[in-house]
Image (tube, grey):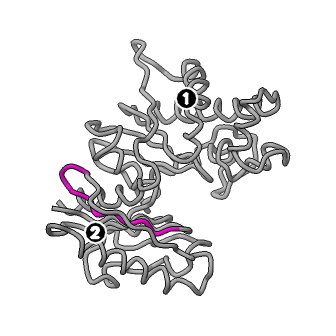
Amino acid sequence: MNAIGIDLGGTWIKGVLMDIYTGEIVKQLYHPTNGDNDRSDAHWKQAVAETVADLRQQSPGSVKAVGLSAPGLPNESNQYIAFMPGRLQGLEGFHWGHFLNDRVYVVNDAHAALMAESRFGVAKGHSNVVMLTLGTGVGGGILIDGKLHQGSFQKAGHVGHITVDSESDRDITGVPGSLEDAIGNVTIQKRSLGRFSSTYQLLEAYKRGDYFAQWLWLTSVRKLAVGVSSLINCFSPELVVLGGGITQAEDDLLLPLAEFMSLYEWRPGGQATPVKIAHFGDMAGAIGAASFAIQTSL
């Protein structure tokens, strides 16, 4: 038996047909979104419909559930995105179940990444997990007693908007000195005084021994350690998972993070919380959408 997962992003629509028991990807598809044009919503909505139809047609067995991952906050019953200003015009309030003539389980994209890791990735077998997605911004999700915690207004897990420096500027939510502003790619030009336009450029200079780049990167990683330690204090997870493009830094991220965590993490009895890089990359949203649909529909 299979499930379909769709990841709707600003650039690509990614779809997977997945075995609900093993997590094996039976088929995967890509379509360009073209979502930056306000008039193009009919294009990407139809592309989603075609992707779902194609995956259904190629399923060797019945399709148990359909999930869709997208940016923004879903409504209480996870039927559509209720709030997503400024991106993908036409997404807010669009009822995917009515459009596709099927029950569709809609979930935030960072929450979907956590569901992928929980069901089939590095967090499999764990009941209490915190995940951070480090990319343009910083998102995340929280798993409590084996279930995704979405909270009131489905806002839970927006870990990028915790404060790690209360004297800094306010971020897009109004929070001063947020974790997102400390390490997200969105602020790299501002943080680097215009020297770097991407975290990738910053890390290349860091590896060359550029002192300014080293100071800037390690400052960001230190703030990440403060944020992760704070989340550990709040939720006491068995595991912290890091995903997103910035994790491609690998040891340049993990080694200094471990050093700073040893300073800031509360470790009763000497027990440190493991921190692991996510297993899934490009297709995490689609796999997580399918995983969320499976869990919610059972």
52 relative to 183 in the view: left or right = left
The quarter of the picture where residue 291 lies is: bottom left
Return the x and y of residue 88 as percentages of the image width and height.
Answer: 55, 75
**What span is in magenta?**
12-23
Q: Is residue 99 magenta?
A: no
79 relative to 19 in the view: left or right = right
Q: In which quarter of the image is the N terminus?
A: bottom left
Q: What residue type is labelled 2?
A: Val
Judging by the rendered image, the residue that carries numbered circle 2 is: 66
Q: Residue 60 carries which label?
A: none
Q: Distance between the residues labelled 2 and 1?
A: 35 Å
- Depicted 204 relative to depicted 49: above or below: above
Q: Is residue 22 magenta?
A: yes
- Depicted 63 relative to depicted 178: above or below: below
What residue is at 82 percent from the left and 27 percent from the top? 211
Circle 2 residues within 10 Å: few <14, some 14–19, many ≥20: many
Circle 1 residues within 10 Å: few <14, some 14–19, many ≥20: some
- Element class at badge 1: helix
- Element class at badge 2: strand
Q: Which amino acid does label 1 sit on?
A: Leu
Q: Which of marks 2 and 1 is nearer the N terminus?
A: 2
Q: Residue 254 carries which label?
A: 1
The quarter of the picture where residue 183 lies is: top right
Q: Quadrant of the C terminus?
A: bottom left
What residue is at 45 percent from the left and 52 percent from the top? 156
